[in-house]
Image: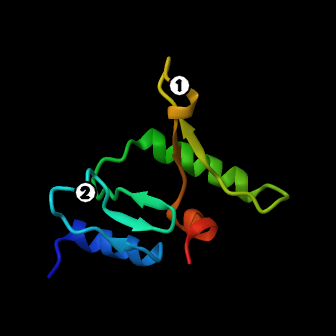
Amino acid sequence: MDKAWKAFERRIAKAMDGARIPVTGERDGADVVGGPFVYQCKLRRGVPSYLRGWLRGIVGAAGRSPTDATGVVIWKEPNGRDDDAVVVLRLKDWKALHGK
């Protein structure tokens, strides 16, 4: 029986039509590879409520858009480079864009 985190990695690998990278000490944080992407999967309690709120808000706004829009949060630290900002979206939206 897989531990919950390993089962999550396997589900993401399947959803992205990719492969889970076994824990060998050489994967440098990469859990799944699929197509042109490498994913790190986190199964953690305590996703910041403000992040969930931002995503919920932009997904709602996208749903009211006259186009077929996808809600995305772009999160950058103050004084950081724009190119180093983090992009957050729902897995189902990512799959619609890049999954099988």
Q: Is residue 11 left or right of residue 5?
A: right
Q: CA distance from mark 2 to mark 1?
A: 26 Å
Q: Is residue 2 above or below residue 49?
A: below
Answer whether labels 2 and 1 touch (C-beta < 8 Å).
no
Q: Position of residue 60 (x, y in %)?
A: 66, 54
Q: Is residue 24 above or below residue 59?
A: below
Q: Position of residue 63 (x, y in %)?
A: 72, 59
Give the amino acid at mark 2. Arg
Please tell me how crowded label 2 is: few (under 14), some (14-19), or many (20+) other residues with Cα within 10 Å: few
Q: Position of residue 45 (x, y in %)?
A: 28, 52
Please tell me how crowded label 1 is: few (under 14), some (14-19), or many (20+) other residues with Cα within 10 Å: few
Q: Is residue 92 left or right of residue 28?
A: right
Q: Earlier in the sequence, mark 2 or mark 1?
A: 2
Q: Secondary structure at mark 2?
A: loop
The front one of 7 and 34 is 34
Which residue is tagged 2? 27
The front one of 73 and 27 is 27
Q: Which mark is residue 81?
A: 1
Q: Position of residue 75 (x, y in %)?
A: 52, 36
